[in-house]
Image: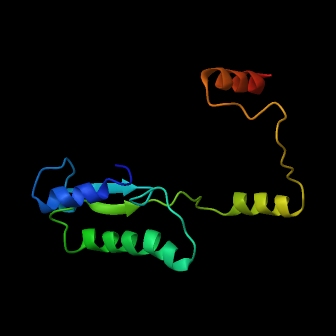
């Protein structure tokens, strides 16, 4: 399941309606990679905690303890690599000036059928 659906599961489970996801005691799992609202702004640490820390860890704990009979287990997947080697390598290369960013003078292309065709044609050449 995707992010943003968790409030619907809560509403259905509280109303005792069938919502197509097994509870945790029957092996049901809820997997998400985004918070409830995938578009957010973070201006300070408290905003980060309100979006990522408090809801995620509260749901993680709650679905594994008190509500195993009603809800699937809640799992939030952080899309970061397990090892830092590639990130360290890229950041070091950027710090040493080995990575040069450039903007292709042919683009940017409009998000139209013709623009996408031109972009793919340029990429093939």
Q: Residue at x 65, y 20 (%)?
A: 114
Q: Is residue 12 left or right of residue 60?
A: left
Where is residue 120 drawn, in percent x and y? Answer: 70, 24
Which residue is at the front of the view, 53 or 105? Answer: 105
Q: How did the renderer colour the structure?
A: rainbow
Task: Kindly tell me whether residue 80 is visible in this rendering.
Answer: yes
Indicate the quadrant where residue 94 lies.
bottom right
Which residue is at the front of the view, 86 or 10? Answer: 10
Q: Is residue 51 above or below residue 89?
A: below
Indicate the quadrant where residue 24 lies.
bottom left
Where is residue 70 drawn, in percent x and y? Answer: 16, 62
Which residue is at the front of the view, 102 or 98? Answer: 102
Q: Residue at x 19, y 47 (%)?
A: 20
Where is residue 14 drawn, in percent x and y? Answer: 14, 62
Q: Is residue 12 above or below residue 113?
A: below
Task: Kindly tell me whether residue 23 is visible in this rendering.
Answer: no
Q: Is residue 108 left or right of residue 9?
A: right
């Amino acid at each position: 399941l995707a992010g943003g659906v968790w409030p619907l599961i809560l509403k259905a489970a509280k109303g005792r309606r069938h919502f197509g996801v097994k509870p945790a005691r029957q092996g049901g799992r809820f997997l998400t990679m985004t918070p409830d609202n995938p578009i957010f702004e973070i201006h300070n640490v408290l905003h980060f905690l309100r979006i990522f820390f408090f809801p995620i860890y509260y749901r993680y704990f709650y679905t594994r303890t008190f509500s195993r009979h009603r809800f699937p287990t809640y799992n939030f997947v952080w899309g970061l690599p397990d090892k830092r080697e590639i990130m360290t390598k890229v950041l070091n290369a950027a710090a040493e000036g080995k990575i040069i960013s450039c903007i292709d003078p042919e683009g940017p292309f409009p998000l139209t059928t013709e623009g996408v065709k031109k972009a793919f044609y340029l990429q093939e050449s």
